[in-house]
Image (cartoon, rainbow, N blue to C red):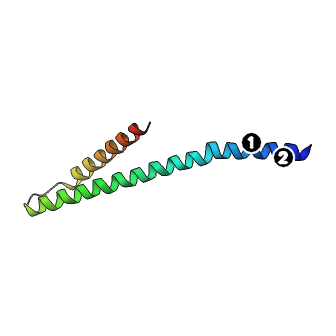
Amino acid sequence: MTVLKELLFSLVYYSAVHKFILERKQEDMKHLLKGAAVAAVVLAALMVINVFCNMHDIHLDQTATGTISAVCAMLFYHGLIRNEK
């Protein structure tokens, strides 16, 4: 009877681990990769804007530029996540 209980426990444990832990980790990794992609896109766009402004002798405020780029990245990320759900 003990072997049967252990087998049942291991099956329940394996299904619970697979359902709640592994699927959650995969979802978290997807969110992490999406966040990294958004950060890369925003930084690339910011570099292009800064190069253009420097070529035309326009000086950007660092505080405002950093704040606006962070807000744009958050909005872009939340837009990607909203489409997923």
Q: Quadrant of residue 53?
A: bottom left
Could you tell me residue 70's position as x and y percent?
30, 49
Q: Is residue 52 above or below residue 69?
A: below
Q: Which amino acid type corresponds to the residue marked 1 in the rendered image?
A: Val
Q: CA distance from mark 1 to mark 2?
A: 10 Å
Q: Which residue is mark 2?
A: 6
Q: Which residue is mark 1?
A: 12
Q: Quadrant of residue 9?
A: top right
Q: Total number of numbered labels?
A: 2
Residue 58 horizontal side relative to residue 67, left or right: left
Could you tell me residue 4's position as x and y percent?
87, 44
Could you tell me residue 77's position as x and y percent?
36, 45
Q: Looking at the figure, which quarter contains the N terminus?
A: top right
Q: Looking at the figure, which quarter contains the C terminus?
A: top left
Residue 60 horizontal side relative to residue 35, left or right: left
Residue 28 horizontal side relative to residue 54, left or right: right
Residue 4 horizontal side relative to residue 83, left or right: right
* Residue placed most toward the observer, 58 or 63: 58
Residue at x 16% of width, y 62% of height: 51
Could you tell me residue 24's position as x and y percent?
56, 45
